Image (cartoon, coloured by chain):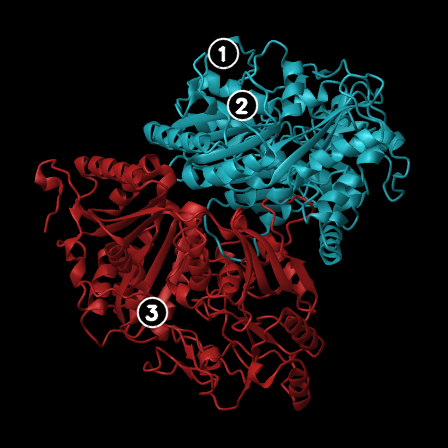
Chain colours: A cyan, B red
Amino acid sequence: MFKSSLQAHKRIAFACHRRAASFSFLPSLKIRVTVNAANSFHHAYSTKPLPKLTAESYPNVTRSSSFKELSPEDMKFFRSVLSEQEILSSTNEEDLAFFNEDWMRKYRGQSKLVLRPKTVEQISKILKYCNENKLAVVPQGGNTGLVGGSIPVFDEIVLSLTQLNKIRDFDPVSGILKCDAGVILENADAFLAEHGYIFPLDLGAKGSCHVGGVVATNAGGLRLLRYGSLHGTVLGLEVVLPNGEIMDSMHSLRKDNTGYDLKQLFIGSEGTIGVVTGVSILTPPRPKAFNVSFLGVESFDAVQKVFVRAKQELSEILSAFEFMDLNSQKLTKLHLKEAIHPLEEEYPFYILIETSGSNKEHDDAKLEAFLEKTMEEGLVLDGVVAQDETELRNLWQWREMVPESSQAGGGVYKYDVSLPLKDLYSLVEAANQRLEEKGLLSPDDASKPVISAVGYGHVGDGNLHLNVAVREYTKDVENALEPFVYEFVSSKSGSISAEHGLGFQKKNYIGYSKSEQEIKMIKDLKSHYDPNSILNPYKYV
Amino acid sequence: MFKSSLQAHKRIAFACHRRAASFSFLPSLKIRVTVNAANSFHHAYSTKPLPKLTAESYPNVTRSSSFKELSPEDMKFFRSVLSEQEILSSTNEEDLAFFNEDWMRKYRGQSKLVLRPKTVEQISKILKYCNENKLAVVPQGGNTGLVGGSIPVFDEIVLSLTQLNKIRDFDPVSGILKCDAGVILENADAFLAEHGYIFPLDLGAKGSCHVGGVVATNAGGLRLLRYGSLHGTVLGLEVVLPNGEIMDSMHSLRKDNTGYDLKQLFIGSEGTIGVVTGVSILTPPRPKAFNVSFLGVESFDAVQKVFVRAKQELSEILSAFEFMDLNSQKLTKLHLKEAIHPLEEEYPFYILIETSGSNKEHDDAKLEAFLEKTMEEGLVLDGVVAQDETELRNLWQWREMVPESSQAGGGVYKYDVSLPLKDLYSLVEAANQRLEEKGLLSPDDASKPVISAVGYGHVGDGNLHLNVAVREYTKDVENALEPFVYEFVSSKSGSISAEHGLGFQKKNYIGYSKSEQEIKMIKDLKSHYDPNSILNPYKYV
């Protein structure tokens, strides 16, 4: 294998990624459910133990008495609005398991009714009825959320957007896409690819998550560094309010300064004040050239220095700057089994850099110059550059498979935080130290609940993912981590939820990131738009 | 002069812009007021006729009786909060003329009191008092607005942000800038330039407009194509609510998903539900290389085709794509007098393309390839490329001076609209036709009120500026244009205000761009946050 490193006496020539052939590449992260015609559901994770009911795990959370229980009259109404195929109703908990559980198997609700409408008018009627009759509702997209936001806590009705899944319109001159909320992200991107455009957001769950869910949770993901947040790229939304009113703001204008930008309220509102049913979004031209480089460095300090260099040298073509710590790679190696890691030696930190642009030759030259400099300066110790599409995907899997690998040993406590760059990794060190001090952590000793706390994430966005890989979920571990993690983040003026949202998990912790005045205004908006609190109760705020 | 064109038998070598030496380059568009120590004000436009009072021009708009008139007790309170230097009070209309008039000299208010606080706490006290005592308030930044939004209509108190003008913080690793609302845009950009960063927004009034004003009006400007809208780049705001409460959301995190994104409500709210006092914004690395090319084309169809080509070929380095029609250039030639137009021949349409990137050589190569192709295909008929910074600025002036040139003959009716690209120019044609049919238009005959209706704008954003250059403002012209222009835009599903906002001018026309449901929700938010309607009354919605 032809590979350069600092030791190679300044002879900087980046390796073609020859080990790729032996990688066991996983073509996509379709770890979600499959639905057959007969409406039975199979879980990719169904061999894992059944999670406890959320109501049992969190006995302090009690069902609100203001909500009515589902009655035969209610069912009669729903049958008048929806066809049989659009209603899943059962008292057998297995039947609706997919809709009652999150994919981490951390939360489990007790809904007896799932509605799967095909039109916005149906959704309007459903919400109007539920609002008038005080029936609690949980809007649900691809159910790939990480904070229990799309799972009922008690007997809330699940409103699934799965069947509202059409592309509505696409303009190949402006690049503006309009689609239903239930379109799967990967499908939207594949559609755009045919027209030379790209969805301005990408994330590991793309094979299952919905465009509407992505917007409702203001997902960040892997392309934010390049294309910015959804608050900038979403041009319009169609939203059904709790009272059944339809806000049709499906505009296709890049600029429109006529009144408050209402749609912004619903981006990141996690289904608490309205149900997103349609999305209009500006999509950029699909880059013609992609490069991916996978690097090993000595310290988190070096990660930061390489990042500043990348912003300067790669500037407009830099589309991802991800880091992974050694432990995250160890877990991924364990999980991927057959796959060979891109770098032969172990390094304390790894960096994945992606460039995307319109001219391969220019991008190659910029990347090469950048890598030469950073290696000459001793910042980068080793690295490879993907030579083709397959190698590129192989390198990406060492970042994209970290979440699943963290989960593979039994479970995972996930924290998704924003921190000032200089403090980004200190949280992982502090968490490991605390778990060790409490005698909860051992990579080898199966009697300890925690395998390892690993860190990775989007350096370009100041966004760390702290994953605490566990053999089982225990109160000891949870108590060791919470509110410790939130207090740590708050002390550094960070955010306790960078991109995953608040959901059920962080409802009580918003005070670590927001001031009293802000929380007051947030609660005030919630009660203004949803006075009966029927939408996604027990969550968010 | 060395110049290539299609006629030059495929010998495509773009001209060095040798006529630059003779350009009378205007270094910046500081057309606003100068303030000396003794607080007297001089207008750059003071030779123009005094505008009629807005109250006289629009007799249907009457002063709301719910507002109290300013009393000696009120003055006593303001003196307890502000120093003498922070209070401008006069019954002599000349003294406060700057604050009562817009720069187009179209609107004139009758305020007798201007408050110029230096701290957010002072602003909080002022608003609390005004809210409790039903005193109407107009927040005012650099007063460069184009829809009469920052001008009192009757005797509203002007709350000027001019003296709240400090840079608060800058992080050279992340590029996050925090500053007071009253910092002048050009000063913010100059500060950033020292650190290798750039303000992600630029516009003609940069020498006078405030960062806070830009945010409060959601200004678009010249860099939107590259850096996106303020809804994506603004990370946090400090806002004083009408009741005096301070919303301190001056976050410096690129990602934060904890609660509704409150700041978004105030971006583009035009001072109607809160006063923006501080801004936290993500700024990108300052490009190392800029190119500007000025092209002549045959038709608006060619403009569109060149645009699609530019998106494909220049992609990530394309930072502006502006078009100007022939009439706009004729007016600008008249106004600039000594300056020589970049292109010798006249063309029906002109295009200004800017690229900005990190590697001059690469950018040059991309631009050259793009120009070669578009000329070979006969899309571009002639053009020049700036060879240095001076030439670059000279080329830009033929775009940036259009607004002032449209105004120079006496006055201008400005319409700033979004339209689907294919319909973008049809509005200009329709407006000229209508004005001619009504016998109101003649470029030469000084007895006709209208000189010319010209079109230019940001093709990349689907944003047209229709400027109707007039010798004087008359009701005949206004009636010929309104609601005609709005109806035309509405029929094409466009926006009647792309980036200028609603202000006073378009308050009654929002229905052409927004649905009843949206307007209901907008009004609902206004009354929710400002139940006494003290902030910027008679405007917006």
Report whether A241 appears left or right of B200: right
> Could you say where residue A409 lies in the image, as x and y percent from the top left?
74, 18
Among the 4 quarters of the image, the one containing residue B389: bottom left
- Three-letter amino acid code at disc 2? Trp
* Marking on residue A19: 1
> Could you say where residue B54 lies in the image, as x and y percent from the top left?
46, 78
Q: Residues within 10 Å of mark 3 (few under 14, many from 20)?
A: many
Report whether B404 appears left or right of A428: left
- Three-letter amino acid code at disc 3? Val
Q: Which residue is at the front of the view, B522 or A517?
A: A517
Label 2's element? helix
Q: Which residue is mark 3?
A: B412
Label 1's element? helix
- Same chain letter for marks 1 and 3: no
Comparing labels 1 and 3, the label whose residue is closer to the camera: 1
For the residues bearing labels 3 and 2, Cβ distance under 8 angstroms? no
> Could you say where residue B114 lies in the image, as x and y percent from the top left?
55, 80
**Gap between marks 3 and 2, in whole Å?**
56 Å
Among the 4 quarters of the image, the one containing residue A131: top right
Q: Badge 1 sits on which subunit?
A: A
Label 3's element? strand
For the residues bearing labels 1 and 2, Cβ distance under 8 angstroms? no
- Three-letter amino acid code at disc 1? Arg
Q: Which residue is mark 2?
A: A396
Residue at the location (39% across, 22% down)?
Answer: A13
**Gap between marks 1 and 3, in whole Å?**
67 Å
Q: Residues within 10 Å of mark 2 (few under 14, many from 20)?
A: many
Q: Is residue A230 above or below residue A412?
A: below
Comparing labels 1 and 2, the label whose residue is closer to the camera: 1
- Same chain letter for marks 3 and 2: no
